[in-house]
Image: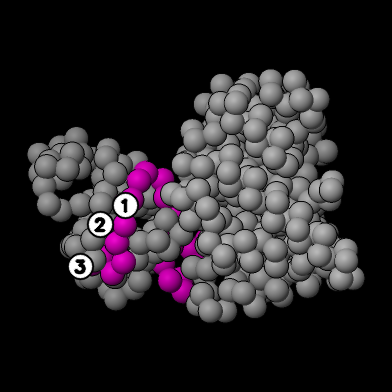
Amino acid sequence: MKHSLHLYGTLGPACATKEKIRTMFLSGMTGMRLNLSHSNLDDCKDWLQQYYEVSERLHIVPELLVDLQGPELRIGTLDIPLSLSENDLIFLVSEKSFDKRKENSAIFSRIIAGEDELSIIPCPDILFSYFDEGQEVKLNDGKIVLELSAPLEEDIFCAKVKKGGELTSRKSIAIKDVTVPLPVLTETDKQNLKLLRKYHVTGVMLPFVRNADDLITLRKELCADGMDYIRIFAKIESLEGVENLPSLLPFCDEIVIARGDLGNAIPLPKLPAIQKQIAMTCLRAKKPFMVVTQMLASMEQNPVPTRAEVTDIFQAVLDGASSLMLTGETAVGAYPEEAIKILAQTSEEALRFKIAKF
């Protein structure tokens, strides 16, 4: 049965070999996403060469979506991963201050190198104007949760770990119930946009779309470089994006229900209803939509998915999704080929059921 869905994996170290990419294509993958939150296009040229060599041999015209940094806040670079446990005390330090102290403070250097029990996390400078005692701060799409204590200085806050985990560089950071104004495109985004033609990119994913102006800004940037043919994927990751959804539809090619950060913006029990609401709005407007985030999260570690995960995929197809995407499952997971195979097989079953039922 030929898929009418677009099925994407995410390109990363776990799958960036010709053999794995070939297997993923043959299993039903139609394209891949490249996450530019942590890198730029030129850094990934070896991966992309493998990707295009395989697709050419298979006589496939592949899709390549790039996921920009966009108006998202991320922590800075960590010298080593941090293993944070519940009730640990840590320091949040502005990136500007972090760099100065790293060079001039022996204590700071010991902590950063893991030679001290304390941990320091460099954070965007702008956040310190919004930090306040008692606030909840979420890291890495809410996998890690902190509670802020009183500031030690204007650019240093102490925090207690409420929900622990391993933290690596450039992961997302958000303050619960606080919106921080940010530009639509970073300088790195603008540099990457100029390379889209060179790397045969077919679509751009813009994170944290807030309003139509965000999408218009991106479209103008693309048109200025003669790339008006590039498709725009609007990622809905905040309540503002949900509320403004109808006004976004004319200015993008596809809506992305990005459940990671969207699940940080609202209580998780409300997330399924929001997903359904977005899907119905898109269907009424005949606007394609994608469902992404943790579709097969357990397969980052295990070769077999949970029953809930395959049901999630099945239901997304029944809801009318035009595209499904895996992220960490293929980029860093232990079973990227198996994950794509499950995604393709489950979505095929859903399509078969949908045709027979309706």
| Amino acid beneath label 3 | Asn
Is the C-beta separation of discs 2 and 1 under 8 Å?
yes
Asked if 138 appears above or below 191 in the picture, the reply is below
Can see residue 94? Answer: no
Q: CA distance from mark 2 to mark 1?
A: 6 Å
Between disc 1 and disc 3, whose residue precedes? 3
Query: Residue 209 vs residue 13: left or right?
Result: right
Q: Which mark is residue 126?
A: none
Residue segment shown in magenta: 159-184
Q: Which residue is mark 1?
A: 166
Q: Residues within 10 Å of mark 3 (few under 14, many from 20)?
A: some
In percent of the image, x 48 and y 56: which residue is there? 298
- Which residue lies under the disc numbered 3? 87
Q: Vertically, is 242 above or below 43?
A: below
Q: Label 1, secondary structure: give it.
A: strand
Label 3 residue SS: loop
Residue closest to the eye, 306 or 322: 306
Q: Residue at x 58, y 58 (%)?
A: 295
Q: Residues within 10 Å of mark 1 (few under 14, many from 20)?
A: few
Pick the quarter of the image with the C terminus. Answer: bottom right
The secondary structure type at the circle numbered 2 is strand
State whether residue 296 is above or below residue 17.
below
Identify the image quadrant of residue 144: bottom left
Q: Residue 4 lies in magenta, yes or no? A: no
Question: Label 2, on which residue?
Answer: 84
Q: Provide residue 329's location: percent of width, then percent of height.
A: 53, 47
Q: Residues within 10 Å of mark 2 (few under 14, many from 20)?
A: many
Which amino acid type is marked by label 2?
Leu
Q: Quadrant of residue 78?
A: top left
Q: Nearer the viewer, residue 353 or 223?
A: 353
